[in-house]
Image: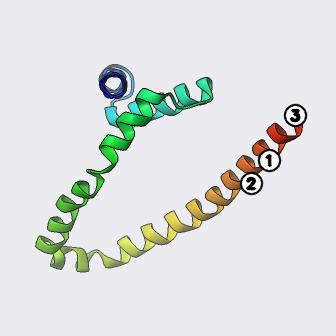
Amino acid sequence: MLKGLTFLVLLQLCGSLISQTLLPMLPGPIIGLLLLLGWLLVRGEIGEPLTQAANGLLQYLPLLLVVPAAGILVSGEQLLGDLGAILAALLLSLLVTVPLCGWLMQAMIRRIDRARDER
């Protein structure tokens, strides 16, 4: 598990370094996630240390929702003032993500079918 966590932290540090030097408009952790995605695509599989680290971190995922929930409770009136913009952003994100997810699912199904046919 320590090897997987170390790898994830190193990717985040590389992302922060890239953010500071080349792409200041993107946060370092986002760049680190993109680096992880690229590495996983090149490798083609998720190794055991990374799986163990991800499973260990997954149990703490609900803790990330505490801060936004507290912010919503504290800033309720301001959110109501911006309700139109929030709804427009939600609708736009829905119109982008639903077709994208469908396209990705179809691509994954085609990839699985190709792999099954090659066997």
> For residue 1, what is the image quadrant?
top left
Mark 2 and mark 1 residues within 8 Å of each other at the beta carbon: yes
- Image color mode: rainbow
Name the residue tied to disc 3: 118
Q: Is residue 72 above or below residue 112?
A: below
- Callout 3 environment at 10 Å: few (<14), some (14 to 19), or many (20+)? few
Determine crowd level at label 2: few under 14, some 14-19, many 20+ residues with C-alpha closer than 10 A.
few
**Residue 75: x, y in percent?**
14, 71
Residue 81: percent from the left, percent from the top?
A: 24, 78
- Residue 90, compared with residue 60, is above or below; it is below
From the image, tell me which residue sits under label 1: 110
What's the residue type where badge 2 is placed? Gln
Q: Is residue 31 visible?
A: no
| Badge 2 element | helix
Spatial CA distance of label 2 from label 1 is 6 Å
Q: Earlier in the sequence, mark 3 or mark 1?
A: 1
| 2 or 110: nearer the viewer | 2
> Tag 1, which secondary structure?
helix
Residue drawn at 36 percent across, 78 percent down: 84
Q: Earlier in the sequence, mark 3 or mark 2?
A: 2
Q: Quadrant of residue 3?
A: top left
Name which residue type carries label 1. Arg
The mark lying in front, picked from 3 and 2, is: 3
Q: Residue at x 44, y 69 (%)?
A: 90
x and y percent of residue 19 in the render?
34, 27
Crowd rating for badge 1 (residues with CA inside 10 Å; few <14, some 14–19, many 20+): few
* Residue at 41% from the left image edge and 75% from the top image edge: 87
Q: Which mark is residue 106?
A: 2
Query: Can you tell which mark lies on residue 89?
Result: none
In the rendered structure, the answer to whether residue 72 lies left or right of residue 44 reads left
Q: Is residue 104 visible?
A: yes
In front of the other: label 3 or label 1? 3
